[in-house]
Amino acid sequence: MLDVCLLGCGGMMPLPYRHLTSLMTRYNGSNLLIDCGEGTQVAIKEKGWSFKPIDTICFTHYHGDHISGLPGLLLTMGNAERTKPLVLIGPKGLERVVNALRVIAPELPFPIVFKEIQGAEQTFLENGYRITAFRVNHNVLCYGYTLEIARAGRFDVERARRADIPMKLWSRLQKGEVIEADGRVYRPEDVLGPARRGIKVTYCTDTRPTDSIAEHAAGADLFVCEGMYGEADKAQKAVEHKHMTFEEAGRLAKRANPAQMWLTHYSPSLVRPDEYMDGVRKLFPASEPGKDGKSVELDFAEE
């Protein structure tokens, strides 16, 4: 099961009722963040989740509303006596940007591992997540992310018995481990059927509509997409500043056909996003306005 929480859905500036951009997921004891805008720590506390299991933070880009919460979060994690490494993933310039922010958080009891995205698309494997970063179209280098949790095939007891595989090795093989024992090599494919459908979440903000977004969000369990402007008269502004309108997000969702779409990264002028949802739902009925703390538990499909 994958827990997903939209910690903050605001763009540009925080508001009394809206934190800046951040999304958090929990899987198998490991937490992951995408973006860390101002207010992320407060949002995590409001949700009742913990800082300590955060193992990976992905950044879409380096505008302040997406990364300004990082120094304080690092200090909090350090004060919690964290010692294990923290992985940071982001566009070119990641280490330079983070080290500049760390002028106010210079001493940490844990190492930071920097992984800069190379090219238009790159995949990372972290703590059970398959993380695919894909380039989008903003006025600075910016990426969307797809998170996938793979699911192995069913364990075939009869195949294991026919192959004379000791029962004490079954659980390790089921977890994907290759085992060498008693002069033999045992592999997961010896006892597992075809891989089953996993869990998929796609997240993008600060971009014009792109083919890459629709392609990566295709068939996702959850698509979290920028909806900077709900008002029809803001369409030209969206083009000029390389953001997206609700309607454009709806068209992307119609192409990608995820199980559901949440809108996020609202302009400060967009006080009541609910009022602009009718047009989105005409394009893609399973659309919902995001809000701070909005959560879902995604489970593997029944087969």
Image (cartoon, grey):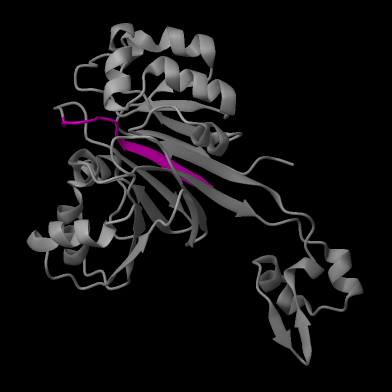
**Segment colored magenta:** 1-14
Indicate the quadrant where residue 116 lies: bottom left
Residue projecting furthest to the right: 162
Q: Quadrant of residue 197?
A: top right
Residue in the image at 35% along x and 49% along y: 33
Residue 158 x/y as whole percent = 88, 65
Indicate whether 5 appears above or below 264. below
Q: Viewer-proximal residue, 172 or 14?
A: 14
Does residue 221 appear in this view? no
Q: Residue at x 83, y 65 (%)?
A: 157
The residue most toward the bottom is 183
Q: Quadrant of the C terminus?
A: top right
Position of residue 36 measured from the top left corner of the image (x, y, whole percent): 26, 46
Left or right: residue 78 compared with residue 274 = left
Give the residue at x 27% y 45%.
44
Q: Is residue 12 above or below residue 26?
A: above
In the image, 245: left or right of 98? right
- Does residue 164 appear anywhere in the picture? yes
**Closest to the observer: 272 or 90?**
90
